[in-house]
Image: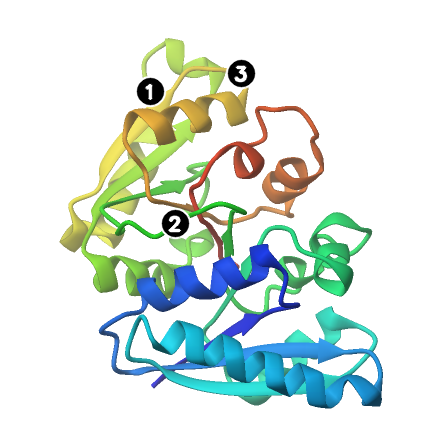
């Protein structure tokens, strides 16, 4: 039985992430979903539980899911999410990219990357206006360095096994204007062996601007989910703190799965 935690502050964006998750998980009978809310004062408990019950009713009307509602009092939503992930041995956290109150602070304030930074659990981040239309194409970004030890096979294969999408593996490097180095060729062979059952296709993009390259690739290949394995969190740090319009997550409707090494 897989356990998936969906934190919510009941904002439109957070609730959209819950609806997206419910549709994505439809038909998955070995999944237990925890709708999770952290409130700041004891006096908010009743309203929090009522809102969770309403959200549960809404999402279970769209899919057959095992859904549990959990509301806890706390002043640090990141700590509380980490606690429930550990206690319930959760396999995945699904949440929106922006919201209000504590959830917004988590992604937009000083603790933006704390949950991902903990390397505790894969986090599927749902863009604000994303609508689930199926997962037909999944792309993995890779730096092609020590892939056998740095690529988390289990969570990636879990997603691929669930949807059986076309699987694309991408590397962006300005040096790709010339032929691939022997190291790149070796790492490509390793990655192919790791994911051979999913018949991955490889793409080496010769551009300096990583975000521009990935954004265009997502559009050209109709990517439904982007998987990244943060290396010292440089990718996500850049992704979420850059304000320009090229930043992938604010420009695209594509969910991003950030999974620890």
Residue 89 lies, in percent from the top left, at: 51, 84
Residue visible at 49% across and 59% down?
17
Residue at 74% x, 71% y: name it: 77
Q: Quadrant of residue 246?
A: top right
Q: Which one is in front in this view, the residue at disc 2 or the one at disc 1?
A: 2
Residue sitting nearer the eye, 198 or 186? 198
| Label 3: element kind | loop
Q: Does 6 sit above or below residue 203?
A: below
Q: Nearer the viewer, residue 55 or 230?
A: 55
Image quadrant for the N terminus? Answer: bottom left
- Across and down, in percent, residue 141 comes to 42, 39
Secondary structure under tag 2 reads: loop
Callouts 2 and 1 close, C-beta under 8 Å: no
| Residue on which the image places disc 2 | 131
Q: Is residue 82 visible?
A: no
Residue linked to disc 3: 208
Front-lying residue, 117 or 81? 81
The circle drawn on residue 180 is: 1
Q: Residue at x 61, y 37 (%)?
A: 239
Could you tell whether 87 is left or right of 188 in the image? Answer: right
Question: What whole-number distance in Å separates the C-alpha atoms at marks 2 and 3?
Answer: 31 Å
């Amino acid at each position: 039985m897989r356990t998936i935690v969906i934190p919510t502050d009941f904002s439109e964006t957070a609730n959209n992430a819950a609806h997206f998750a419910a549709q994505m998980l439809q038909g998955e009978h070995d999944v237990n979903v925890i709708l999770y809310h952290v409130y700041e004062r004891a006096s908010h408990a009743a309203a929090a539980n009522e809102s969770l019950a309403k959200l549960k009713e809404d999402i279970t009307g769209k899919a057959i899911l095992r859904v549990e509602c959990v509301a806890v009092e706390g002043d640090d939503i990141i700590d509380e999410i980490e606690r429930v992930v550990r206690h319930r041995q959760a396999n995945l956290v699904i949440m929106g990219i922006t919201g209000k109150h504590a959830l917004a602070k988590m992604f937009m304030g000083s603790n933006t990357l704390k949950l991902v930074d903990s390397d505790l659990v894969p986090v599927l981040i749902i863009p604000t206006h994303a609508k689930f239309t199926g997962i037909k194409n999944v792309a993995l970004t890779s730096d092609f360095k020590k892939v056998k030890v740095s690529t988390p096979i289990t969570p990636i294969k879990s997603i691929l096994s669930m949807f059986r999408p076309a699987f694309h593996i991408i590397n962006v490097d300005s040096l790709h204007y010339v032929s691939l180095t022997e190291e790149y060729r070796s790492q490509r062979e390793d990655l192919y062996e790791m994911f051979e059952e999913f018949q991955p296709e490889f793409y080496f993009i010769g551009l300096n601007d990583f975000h521009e390259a990935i954004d265009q690739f997502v559009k050209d290949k109709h990517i439904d989910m982007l998987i990244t394995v943060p290396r010292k969190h440089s990718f996500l740090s850049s992704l979420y703190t850059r304000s320009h319009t090229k930043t992938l997550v604010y420009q695209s409707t594509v969910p991003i799965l950030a999974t620890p090494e």
